Amino acid sequence: MAEAPPPDAPPADAAAAPPDAAAAPPPEAAAPPPDAAAAPPADAGAAAPPPGPATLTADPPEANMPAAGGVSTHTLSNPSGVRLAFKVKSTNNNEYRLRPVYGFVEATGNSPLEITRSAGPPKADKLVIQFKEAAADASDAAPLFKEGAPLGELTLPLNAA
């Protein structure tokens, strides 16, 4: 036969719960963080936010080619809302040919860049792509780089093995 619990023992179901659980009030629903409460709901039909500051990116961000020669094609992208002119400079003009050397990338647009390497000794080089804002009616990027400093530059490593 089972023994009866001592008279001062808590009931059997209370033994499983933590001692303060019976006295604690039920948890309240968590309030949203203050910033989330103040933010308006996302509108799927709203226009995209304005593009950020003028910048230029390259995809892929580096060129890997055999030392025996080859071609690497890249895309210059302008995520900003302004038209950019660019100028491409190389640390090795003996083995690398670039097309184009000067050009434009429209606001939120792309432009191709082709890098051709001729045969030569394996060496690590780089391209520096300078950029600056360009007027909508500008048709030749070269003279723009004779007028003041560029807005920024992008370095693209060239690896020939």
Image (cartoon, rainbow, N blue to C red):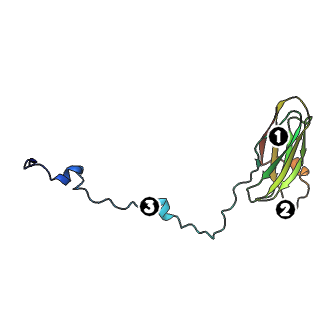
Q: Residue furthest front?
A: 1
Q: Is residue 62 above or below residue 80?
A: above
Q: In the image, what residue occupies the spot 86% across and 33% down?
A: 67
Dot 2: what SS?
loop
In this view of the protein, which residue sits in the foreground, 34 or 13?
A: 13
The x, y position of residue 87, in whole percent, is 86, 47
Q: Residues within 10 Å of mark 1 (few under 14, many from 20)?
A: many
**Residue beneath the point at 75% across and 44% down:** 61
Q: Nearer the viewer, residue 27 or 85?
A: 27
**Viewer-nearest residue: 151 or 110:** 110
* Amino acid type, mark 1: Leu
Looking at the image, which residue is at 81% across and 41% down? 128
Q: Amino acid at mark 2?
A: Ala
Mark 3 vs mark 2: in front: 3
Q: Is residue 106 visible?
A: yes
Which numbered disc flags the more N-terminal residue, 2 or 1? 1
Residue at the disc numbered 2: 136
Which residue reaches farthest bottom? 45
Find numbered disc 3 in the image and state the secondary structure of the residue it sits on.
Answer: loop
Can residue 19 be seen?
no
Relative side of 118 to 125, left or right: right
The residue tagged 3 is 32
Residue where numbered disc 1 is placed:
127
Comes first in the chain, label 3 or label 2: 3
Residue 136 vs residue 48: left or right?
A: right
Disc 3 marks which amino acid? Pro
Residue 149 position in % (x across, y down): 82, 46
Q: Secondary structure at mark 1?
A: strand
Which quarter shows the C terminus? top right
